[in-house]
Image (cartoon, grey):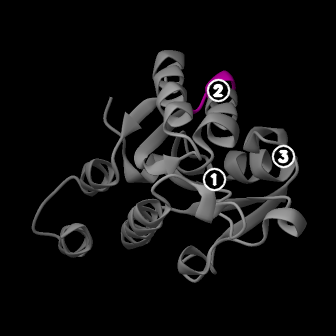
């Protein structure tokens, strides 16, 4: 199945100041997620971000926060975004079926959200090079489980070009500049 931008929404899960420095390859994850966000914006794909227990984990890291100011931010206490009624309401109102996911941690909030999205009839698209955990094995096992559960696993460059569909457009030029 081809993923189309008019049927897609981005979800940035809990990339927050206090936990992020402990995440494996966090600098690469920040860079890749920034490109993903900029690409989704160029393609006019809406984005929702979540923050887990801001009092304890702090806000979204500055590099991403500045890119997300115009989008809905939902604070949550549950691990799965789907256990937060405001997220599920926003998702339902978007009328989008593909949820393009970046965030941390792969084996906790990302995994539980993916499983719940599948259960609720959505198609989670996990951007593998935009998710991580503190431990490499936790991420590896989580990606394996998400794939077995039925999630689509991709990379930021692959999903951006898939959403773009055609070369020679202004969107294509913007995506090409981002991924260089």
Q: Position of residue 8 (x, y in %)?
A: 48, 49
Tell whether 101 sits left or right of 90.
left
Q: Please, is residue 66 above or below residue 179 in the view?
A: below
- The residue indicated by pointer 2 is 115
Residue at x 59%, y 47% (from the top left corner): 134
Front-lying residue, 109 or 164: 109
Q: Please, is residue 127 above or below residue 72 in the view?
A: above
Q: Residues within 10 Å of mark 3 (few under 14, many from 20)?
A: some
**How many numbered marks, from 0 up?**
3
Q: Residues within 10 Å of mark 2 (few under 14, many from 20)?
A: some
- The residue indicated by pointer 3 is 84
- The residue indicated by pointer 1 is 94
Q: Which dot, 1 or 3, sits closer to the camera?
A: 3
| Cα–Cα span, label 2 and label 1 | 20 Å
Tell whether 169 sits left or right of 49.
left
Q: Quadrant of residue 153?
A: top left
Tell whether 67 sits left or right of 15.
left
């Amino acid at each position: 199945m081809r993923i189309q931008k008019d049927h897609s929404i981005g979800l940035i899960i809990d990339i927050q100041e206090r936990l992020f420095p402990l995440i494996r390859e966090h600098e690469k994850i920040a860079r890749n997620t920034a490109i993903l966000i900029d690409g989704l914006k160029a393609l006019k794909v809406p984005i929702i971000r979540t923050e887990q227990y801001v009092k304890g984990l702090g806000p979204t890291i500055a590099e991403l926060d500045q890119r997300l100011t115009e989008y809905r931010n939902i604070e949550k206490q549950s691990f799965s975004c789907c256990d937060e009624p405001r997220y599920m309401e926003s998702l339902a109102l978007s009328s989008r079926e593909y949820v393009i996911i970046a965030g941390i941690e792969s084996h906790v909030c990302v995994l539980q959200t993916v499983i719940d999205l599948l259960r609720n009839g959505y198609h989670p698209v996990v951007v593998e090079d935009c998710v991580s955990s503190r431990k490499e094995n936790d991420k590896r096992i989580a990606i394996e489980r998400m794939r077995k559960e039925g999630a689509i696993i991709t990379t930021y460059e692959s999903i951006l070009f898939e959403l773009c569909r055609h070369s020679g457009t202004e969107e294509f030029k913007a995506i090409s500049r981002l991924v260089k």
